[in-house]
Amino acid sequence: RGSRSRGTPSAFYTVANASAPPTLDVVTNGDVFLFVAGGTTAGKSDASVLVGINNSALFHRSAVSAGRLTTSRLPATFAKPVEFGFWAPNSYILGPVSHKRTVSLAVDPSDSAVVAVSGWSSVATNEGSESVHVTFDAGKTWVDVTANLPTATGVCTNRERCGKWRPSALLLLP
C-alpha cells in the first residue's frame, strides 16, 4: 500500500538490498489483496514470478514477460474488503479491522501462467453469482470453470432454504 504522506502510490516495488531505496515496478491503482512470489515457468524454477490480485486486476511477472510486471483485467469485478480506519493515532479498535478476504487466488506450482481466481461480488448484499475462472496464459484469456460447483459443494443438500456458496480458497494441483 502506498503512502500519502510520503507521496508514494500503491504499487509493487523491488528492493535490491537493505540499503537501496525501493524501485517502482508498477502502480496497481489500489491495494493488492493477495500475492504469490516465486514459482515455476515453462518447467523451470523462476524466482522472478510475482502474481497478485485486487478486486479488478491480475498482476503477473515471470521469465516469459522478461521480468516485466503485466496487468490484466479480471473476468469479473470482485468486492473490496470492508476496512475500518483508525480515528486517531494510538487509538484502539475492538473487533476486526477487515471483512477478511473477498478474493481467492491460486497459482499452478508447475506453471505460473496458470492462475485461478474467485471472489465475492458484494459484501453489502448476498446478490451476484459466485464463479471460478482460470487463465492458462497469465491473464490474457479466462475460462469459467464453475460448472456444477454449487451443487458439488453440498451447500444446499437437505436444506429447505439455501444461501450462497462463497469460494474462500483455491488450490491448483500439478
Image (cartoon, helix red, strand yellow):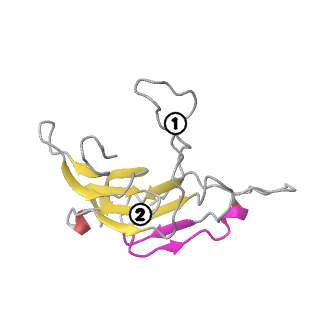
Magenta-highlighted residues: 132-151
Residue drawn at (71%, 57%), measured in percent from left and top? 164
The residue sitting at the front extreme is 88
Residue pointed to by mark 1:
97
Question: Was residue 48 drawn as part of the magenta stretch in this picture?
Answer: no
* Location of residue 71 (image quadrant): bottom left
Disc 2 on helix, strand or loop?
A: strand
Residue placed most toward the observer, 41 or 170: 170
Question: Eyeballing the image, is 115 above or below 155?
Answer: below
Can I make out residue 46 in this image? Answer: no
Name the amino acid type tagged 2.
Ala
Disc 1 on helix, strand or loop?
A: loop
In primary-sequence order, the first of circles 2 and 1 is 2
Residue pointed to by mark 2:
57
Q: Quadrant of the C terminus?
A: bottom left
Mark 2 packing: few (<14 Cα in 10 Å), some, or many (20+)? many
Contact between labelled residues 1 and 2, with CB atoms less than 8 Å apart: no
Counting from the top left corner in percent of width and height, residue 95 is at 58, 30
Residue placed most toward the observer, 83 or 25: 83
**Horizontal placement of 45 versus 56: left or right?**
left
The residue sitting at the right extreme is 160
Counting from the top left corner in percent of width and height, residue 120 is at 58, 57
**Horizontal placement of 43 versus 158: left or right?**
left
**Horizontal placement of 17 versus 31: left or right?**
left
Q: Which mark is residue 114?
A: none
Number of disc labels: 2
Name the amino acid type tagged 1.
Val
Can I make out residue 154 in this image? Answer: yes
Counting from the top left corner in percent of width and height, residue 161 is at 84, 56
Residue placed most toward the observer, 61 or 70: 70
Residue drawn at (49%, 70%), measured in percent from left and top? 75
